[in-house]
Amino acid sequence: MDYVKKGAWSPEEDQKMIDYIMQYRIWNWSHMPKFAGLSRTGKSCRLRWINYLKPDLKKGPFSMEEVEIVFRMYQSLGNKWSAIAKELPGRTDNEIKNFYHTHLKKHHGRKDEVKPKSRKKAKQLEMSNQKKPLITTCPNIEGPNDQSLDFTNSSSSSSYITFDENYEILETSNQDNDVTSIVNQVHDDDNIVILESNPESSTSSSSSSVDLHINDFMDVSVHSSNVVDFWLELYLAADNLKI
DNA sequence: AACCGTTCCAACCGCAAACGG
DNA sequence: CCCGTTTGCGGTTGGAACGGT
C-alpha cells in the first residue's frame, strides 16, 4: 500500500476534497481519495468531510437550546451520539460527544467539589470572586429574553440560594437549606436569574443580570455544589452572555 | 523566557451494522 | 445465506493552545 498520510489536515487537502466532492459528489469513500489526489484512507476522508468540511455544518458555541437538547436526549438515550445529532441540524455526533464530555459530563450526578477546571471557568470565578453570587428563581418574570428585568416586582415569589466566594451554600430561602427542594420547585418555563452580585448591595436596575430558560433537566437530584456548577456552565455556554 | 500541567477538540482506532454480489 | 467490502458509531488519544509559575 502506498504511503498514507495521518494527522491534521492541511488547507490544501481540504480544498482538494471540497473541489472533488463538489464536482463528483460522494460515490465511494474508500476509492475516492486516490481520484481526488489525496494520500488518505477513505475513512479519514469521510470523517474530515462529515465533521469539518460539509457545507451545512454549524460552527461556533452551542446555543442554550442546543445544550438543552443534548442534555435531555442524553438523559433519555444515553451515549447515542448520532441519534442526538439528528436533533441538532449542523452539529455532528463527534462534536456533540466532545461537547458532552468537556462541558456536561461533570454535572451528571458526581459529588465532586466545585473547582475551576476549565480556563473559562477559572476566569469566571476569578472575575466574580469579589462579591457573593446569588441565584434567584423568579417565576413571575415574563419574557425569556427580556434583559431589563425589574426584581422589585417579583421578589415576593422568589426563592433564592446564596453562596460564598467558594460557592459553598450560605443560605437558602427555605428553612433547612435544602437546595434540591428549591431546584425541584422550578417548573418548565420559569426563569432563572443569575446575578453577579447581591441585589441588596447594588440597585436592581444597574445590576448586571441575565436570564436563563429553566428546563426540567436541570432539576437533577444532585449534590448542591453540582447545581451551582451547572448554572455557571450554562451561563458560559450562552455565547451572548457576558460578565 | 522557559517550563509544566491542564483543557479541549480533531482525528484515530476497533468493532458493528449495512450493503451487495 | 454467506462472505467480502463499505459505512457508521462510539471510545480513546495526540497534540495544540493556554494559563500558571
Image: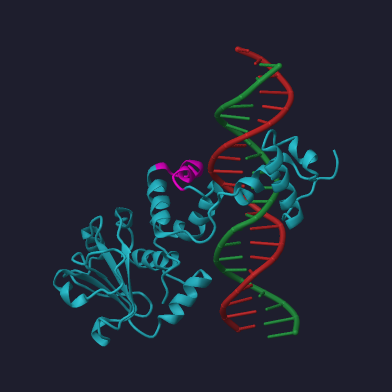
Chain colours: A cyan, B green, C red
Q: How far across and how far down the image is residue A146, in percent?
A: 29, 68
Q: Which residues are magenta?
A: A77-88
Q: Is residue A168 above or below residue A11?
A: below
Quadrant of image for the N terminus of chain A:
top right
Q: How far across and how far down the image is residue A83, in percent?
A: 47, 41
Of A229 and A205, nearer the camera is A205
Magenta region includes residue A85: yes
Q: Is residue A77 left or right of residue A155?
A: right
Q: How far across and how far down the image is residue B9, in percent?
A: 59, 58
Q: Is residue A166 above or below residue A20?
A: below
Residue that protrudes farthest toward the left in the picture: A156
Q: Is residue B3 above or below residue A50?
A: below
Magenta region includes residue A50: no
Residue depicted at 30% across the width and 60% down the height:
A214
Q: How far across and how far down the image is residue A38, in percent?
A: 78, 45
Residue depicted at 38% across the width and 85% down the height:
A130
Q: Is residue A145 left or right of residue A186?
A: right
Residue depicted at 51% across the width and 42% down the height:
A82
